[in-house]
């Protein structure tokens, strides 16, 4: 019975240490910042098309597209349609 407790305690220590390492690594690379998210809302092809339509925005991530839509607000659909027609 004591070996089971020891194994559980040992596993908990290893698990906790691993969790701390993962958390630290995520903090170091700003992992939870949505501006780095890619292919969560838009697939790569869609992201590329939006980037071509709005080259001045330097779109690389889903967050960039969300910011674009926010900036244009209610006029986004009209602007998008105009740029598609000009292609």
Image (cartoon, rainbow, N blue to C red):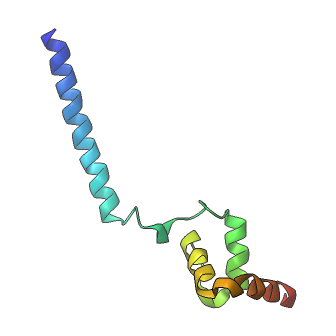
Residue 39 is left or right of residue 24, and the answer is right
The residue lying at 30 percent from left, 53 percent from top is 23
Quadrant in which the C terminus appears? bottom right
Of the 4 image quadrants, the one containing the N terminus is: top left
Q: Is residue 36 left or right of residue 7?
A: right
Query: Between 16 and 71, which is closer to the camera in this rendering?
Result: 71
Q: Residue furthest top?
A: 1
Residue 4: x percent and y percent? 20, 14
Q: Is residue 68 above or below residue 22?
A: below
Q: Classify residue 60 as left or right of residue 32.
A: right
Q: Where does the image place residue 24, in percent across and percent down from the top left? A: 27, 56
Task: Name the quadrant containing residue 43.
Answer: bottom right
The picture quadrant where one finds residue 86 is bottom right
Farthest residue toward the left? 2
Q: Position of residue 52 (x, y in %)?
A: 72, 82
Q: Where 24 sits versus 19, above or below?
A: below
Percent coordinates x, y for residue 78 in the rendering: 77, 86
**Of residues 23 and 74, the one drawn nearer to the viewer in this rendering:** 74
Quadrant hosting residue 82:
bottom right
| Total numbered badges shown on the rendered structure | 0
Residue at screen point 23% across, 28% down: 11
At horizontal 70% and vertical 77% (from top left) the residue drawn is 50
Q: In this view, does 48 lie above or below 23?
A: below
**Residue reaching furthest front?**
74
């Amino acid at each position: 019975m004591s070996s089971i407790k020891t194994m559980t305690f040992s596993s908990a220590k290893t698990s906790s240490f691993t969790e701390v390492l993962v958390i630290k690594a995520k903090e170091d690379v700003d992992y939870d910042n949505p501006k780095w998210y890619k292919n969560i809302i838009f697939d790569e092809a869609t992201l590329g098309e939006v980037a071509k339509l709005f080259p001045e925005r330097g779109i690389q991530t889903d967050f960039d597209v969300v910011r674009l839509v926010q900036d244009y607000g209610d006029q986004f659909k009209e602007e998008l349609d105009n740029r598609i027609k000009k292609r």
